[in-house]
Amino acid sequence: MSIFDILGPVMVGPSSSHTAGAVRMGQITRRLVGGEPVRAKILLSGSFASTGAGHGTPRAIVAGLMGFMPDDERIPYSFEIAGERGLEFEFGTAVLHDVHPNSALITVENDRGERVEVGASSPGGGRILVFSLDGLPASFSGEVPTLIVRTGDMPGYVSRVTGVLAAQGINMSKLRVERQGRGETAIMVIECDQRIPYKVKVAISAIEGVKKVTRLNPGEESK
């Protein structure tokens, strides 16, 4: 057990799960879409839907979409700031099964017209878990260096991607591959022991059939 587990995160707001965790859910969605979010649809589930408003959950998610940290004093004013920045957003509710009660489904479009759908939960202590990505099952937190590769479903692409990591001396701790269907889009999520440098993204992006590569290094904006 760490001191973080006892004291919780440094944050603005009454709840580590409903506020700090909600900010991080917005942050990781921002990093997964890349660029600047311009439109967002946020569906709250479980206790997020029933009690989130009182804990500031909606404002916290919007703050995270703009890149704010959990201790940012602007979180209570995130709606107004989003309006000034041109971020359009709407909220609704959803019934999400087999996930933590503190969950949301966030669909975001960036300034380049790229879109991502992220299902994430906030189990407590400011931590989060992404349980779905673009409608496919996932399981990662973003607390360790993570690589997300979207590609066509084709033979040999897993070995080609992991080969790039091996050539750079990057050790994998977890690998998960999901696909929409045979021959359709597949998503590979790789958690690593070392920071993932930009040149790895460049090398993997050059592999035939790869559609998008996202790096999630803790504490860094994705690029």
Image: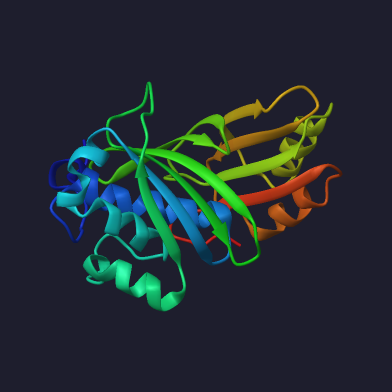
Residue 67 appears at what percent x and percent y? 41, 65
Above or below for 75 versus 140: below
- Res 196 seen here: no
The image quarter containing residue 104 is top left
- Picture coordinates of residue 7, whole percent (x, y): 13, 47
- Above or below for 31 versus 112: above
How many numbered discs? 0
- In the picture provided, is 206 more to the left or to the right than 4? right
- Colour scheme: rainbow
Horizontal and vertical percent position of residue 51:
17, 42
**Which quarter of the figure is the C terminus placed in?**
bottom right
- Residue at 61 percent across and 43 percent down: it is 148
Asked whether residue 119 is in view, the answer is yes
Residue placed at 44% from the left, 76% from the top?
Answer: 85
Q: Quadrant of residue 127?
A: top left
Image: 81 above or below 137: below
Asked whether, in this view, residue 140 is left or right of residue 71, the answer is right
State the image coordinates of residue 149 (x, y, percent, origin top left): 67, 42
As drawn, which residue projects farthest toward the bottom?
A: 84
* 2 horizontally vs 130: left or right: left
Between 186 and 215, the residue placed more toward the observer is: 186
Query: Is residue 198 found left or right of 18 in the rendered image?
Result: right
Name the foreground residue: 175 vs 197: 175
